[in-house]
């Protein structure tokens, strides 16, 4: 029996479940707070695909759990189910039909969670923590792609314990994204590889990184015809590179922009530069959101090359973000990301996931 | 003076490119807006004859005697009457024109007016460039070439422009930007990174797999490149593009896809996280935040023992069924000591409405649940947690 009920689109934000307190800065944007948030840092967020009626949010955390909520139009969030790994969960993704959730963990495995039966089985194994997991749906095959710190990219048919394919990476996988027929993987030591997935996954091109610092997050964007055409790559140095795969004029089309930095050069204090923890593209507008260690999120229009909005500063870094399938909801998590090391970790500090209505704020700027 | 003695050219601020009617106003403006020591936030002593009562001037300094140079480069930075602690000496090796130039920062500035200027053509009243010797007097033309030098990008394909002057305080908001155009154009041209569009042309479109990416842009995205004319970027939102971040490669190393910055080549390469103008909020080792965090014992307690059969057992029955057999293997005991919050789960769900009949209160019962893994037979290290339910078998 299906676990999930129906719900229509997300309307304008409802009331925050817990209400916002006056003095603390945990929710300066007054966004909706998801109930029963995980007990340790949230590492990944993912909304259900359009094939599923309603909106369901999955979050993986450093408390080894993966949680699922239903998000209703009113903004109410209802915890639905949970699964555990034996290590922190680093990435989650949905199957295209919305019936399964795939989870990747530090316990070197990846699992497939059947939401209808609420059972999870292991479907992948690596020699080191699995950092990324993505579902690939091709006309002639479907599989799960896992990227790990063991420097391999493996493709799994969920019915077999042996991978369909193993591709070697130059270094540990740090982040990846898949939009058929393209996949991008960014690794340690600023490695950057693009794969093409038609027929079977194969390496398409290794790219000289447009960034000078450690890669942290990547997201593919599409062109007007809805085909993947490039990606945005974020680093630990408060910078995002927009890179097209085959641009007419690379020198002009590709660029980088700075973000998630503190104080302008007007003040004489050294500027603090924060890592970009996540990038997500709005599924309808094509504009993008970035979230950083500085505790802010920003919306950008890459075609107009302008910033659309920057939020107030939260009291914790924002560790992950994602849009729902129709772009009405922007979810972001507020938890410590270890950017200041072990010393600043406070296990007592609450971790939050906020939901924000994203229909209006991410509209592109009028074309110049 | 130099040959560049201009007639009645209105003095302009070369930090922010504003015109001023009077040099006095110009100087005041510069003192107010640009001359701050980035370390101690105090105003820099500009070398101008100290005017008692001028903003930032410590009291008690006598006015300069005519004809007596207040300071010459190389002189000890201490002048009688100078407030202690006002100097932050820094030596900067500049790669400008291949010269090494040491300039005292903060505190002292080389001579002001009335003294044979360091550079020819120095506009009157202009305190010599602090961190960038040689720049102020540069004309536009020079400005363009300098960044060109700066960048020294042999970098054809390899590099990514992002050439920022290695030095601290950006002198020319425009300079940095102008720099990039030089680079980028050269990069673009020489950029023959034509990767064979290999067999599968992935995406429609033409050849030229250009890998090169263009230089940095201002925070608002406007590319700094390609339009030398536009010195635009009046720092749109917040950060002028040139501000340089961590040392990292910048111009010096550029080219090679070398490590971002291995200041020390130790096992985990370390990053250079602090430079004069900026500070990277990131631990020093060049490993990802997650890797660093995962090393903590706290997050490793539950990991399956090595030798743990990998997948081995495909889907098995409902997890619930599995639970019982688990012997109490407490290897991972104490896991999650700081787990008290688990209690929360139960707490919240008390009145949770909206559940499908038969559905379980979402997070299973209070104490930490752990679905040991579906799979197979008792996985020993399944840290025994109070054998609670385990989601499984719920629905």
Image (cartoon, coloured by chain):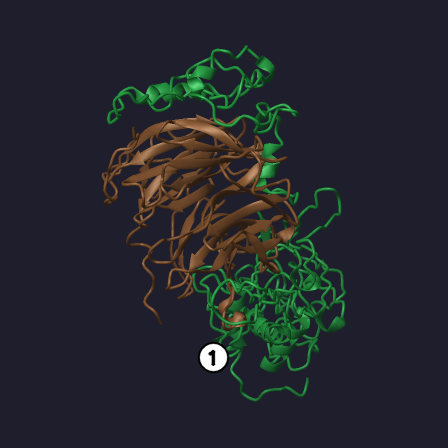
Chain colours: A brown, B green
- Give the residue number, with chain letter if any, for mark 1: B21
- Residue B58 makes an appearance in the image: no
A186 to B244, vertically: above or below: above
- Quadrant (top left/top right/bottom left/bottom right) for the N terminus of chain A: top left
| Closer to the camera in the image, A310 or B350 | B350
Q: Is residue A174 left or right of residue A320?
A: right
Picture quarter containing residue B4? bottom right
Residue B16: % across, % down: 51, 70
- Residue A300 makes an appearance in the image: yes
- Quadrant (top left/top right/bottom left/bottom right) for the C terminus of chain A: bottom left
Residue B40: % across, % down: 60, 51
Q: In this view, does A210 lie to the left or right of B357?
A: right
| Closer to the camera in the image, A320 or B180 | A320
Q: In this view, does B192 lie to the left or right of B102?
A: left
Picture quarter containing residue A77? top left
Secondary structure at numbered mark 1: loop
- Chain bearing tag 1 is B
Residue A228: % across, % down: 44, 59
Residue B277: % across, % down: 60, 56
């Amino acid at each position: 029996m299906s676990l999930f009920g129906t719900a229509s689109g997300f309307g304008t934000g409802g009331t925050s479940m817990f209400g916002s307190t006056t003095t603390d800065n945990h929710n300066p944007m007054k966004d909706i707070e998801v109930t029963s948030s995980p007990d340790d840092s949230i590492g990944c967020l993912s909304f259900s695909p359009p094939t599923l009626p309603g909106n369901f949010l999955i979050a993986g955390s450093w408390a080894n759990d993966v949680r699922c909520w239903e998000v209703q139009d009113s903004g109410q969030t209802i915890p639905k189910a949970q699964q555990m790994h034996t290590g922190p969960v680093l990435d989650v993704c949905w199957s295209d039909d919305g019936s399964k959730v795939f989870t990747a963990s530090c316990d070197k495995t990846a699992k497939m969670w059947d939401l209808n039966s609420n059972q999870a089985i292991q479907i992948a194994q690596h020699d080191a923590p699995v950092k990324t997991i993505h579902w690939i749906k091709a006309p002639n095959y479907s599989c799960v792609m896992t990227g790990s710190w063991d420097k391999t990219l493996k493709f799994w048919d969920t019915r077999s314990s042996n991978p369909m394919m193993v591709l070697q990476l130059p270094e540990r996988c740090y982040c990846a994204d898949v939009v058929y027929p393209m996949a991008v993987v960014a690794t340690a030591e600023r490695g950057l590889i693009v794969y093409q997935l038609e027929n079977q996954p194969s390496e398409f091109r290794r790219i000289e990184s447009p960034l000078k610092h450690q890669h942290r997050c990547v997201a593919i964007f599409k062109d007007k015809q809805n085909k993947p055409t490039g990606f945005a790559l974020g680093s630990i140095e408060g910078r995002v590179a927009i890179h097209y795969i085959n641009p007419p004029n690379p020198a002009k089309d590709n660029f980088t922009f700075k973000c998630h930095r503190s104080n302008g050069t007007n003040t004489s204090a050294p500027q603090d530069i924060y890592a970009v923890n996540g990038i997500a593209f709005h599924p309808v507008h094509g504009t993008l959101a970035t979230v950083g260690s500085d505790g802010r999120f920003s919306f950008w229009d890459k075609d107009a090359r302008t910033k659309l909005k920057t939020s107030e500063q939260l009291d914790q870094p924002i560790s992950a973000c994602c849009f729902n399938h129709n772009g009405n909801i922007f979810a972001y998590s507020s938890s410590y990301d270890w950017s200041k090391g072990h010393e600043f970790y406070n296990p007592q500090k609450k971790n939050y996931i906020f939901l924000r209505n994203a229909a209006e704020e991410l509209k592109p700027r009028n074309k110049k | 003076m130099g040959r560049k003695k201009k007639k009645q050219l209105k003095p302009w601020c070369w930090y922010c490119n504003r015109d001023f009617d009077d040099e006095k106003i110009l100087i005041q403006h510069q003192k107010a807006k640009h001359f701050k020591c980035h370390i101690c936030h105090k105003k820099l002593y500009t070398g101008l004859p100290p005017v008692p009562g001028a903003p930032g001037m410590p009291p008690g300094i006598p006015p300069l005697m005519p004809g007596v140079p207040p300071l010459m480069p190389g002189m000890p930075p201490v002048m009688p009457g100078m407030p202690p602690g006002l100097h932050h000496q820094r030596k900067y090796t500049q790669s400008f024109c291949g010269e090494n130039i040491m300039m005292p920062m903060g505190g002292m500035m080389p001579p002001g007016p009335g003294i044979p200027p360091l550079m020819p053509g120095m506009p009157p009243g202009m305190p010599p460039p602090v961190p960038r010797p040689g720049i102020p007097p540069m004309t536009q033309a020079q400005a363009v070439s300098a960044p060109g030098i700066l960048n020294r990008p042999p970098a054809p394909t390899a590099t990514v422009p992002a050439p920022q002057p290695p030095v601290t305080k950006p002198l020319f908001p425009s300079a940095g930007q102008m720099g990039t155009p030089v680079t980028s154009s050269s990069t673009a041209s020489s950029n023959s990174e034509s990767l064979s569009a290999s067999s599968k042309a992935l995406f429609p479109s033409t050849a030229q797999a250009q890998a090169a990416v263009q230089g940095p842009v201002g925070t608002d995205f406007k590319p700094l490149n390609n339009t030398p004319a536009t010195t635009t970027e009046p720092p749109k939102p917040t950060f002028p593009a040139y501000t340089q971040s961590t040392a990292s490669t910048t111009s010096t190393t550029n080219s090679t896809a070398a490590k971002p910055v291995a200041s020390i080549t130790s096992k985990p390469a370390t990053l250079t996280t602090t430079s004069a103008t900026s500070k990277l909020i990131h631990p020093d080792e060049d490993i990802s935040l997650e890797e660093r965090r995962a090393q903590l014992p706290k997050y490793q307690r539950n990991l399956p023992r090595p030798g743990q059969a990998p997948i081995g057992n495909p889907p098995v029955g409902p997890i619930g069924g599995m639970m019982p057999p688990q012997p109490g293997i407490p290897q991972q005991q104490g896991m999650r000591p700081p787990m008290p919050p688990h209690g929360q789960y139960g707490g919240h769900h008390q009145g949770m409405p909206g559940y499908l009949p038969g559905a379980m209160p979402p997070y299973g019962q209070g104490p930490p649940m752990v679905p040991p893994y579906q799979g197979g037979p008792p996985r020993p290290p399944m840290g025994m947690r109070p054998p609670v339910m385990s989601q499984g078998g719920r629905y």
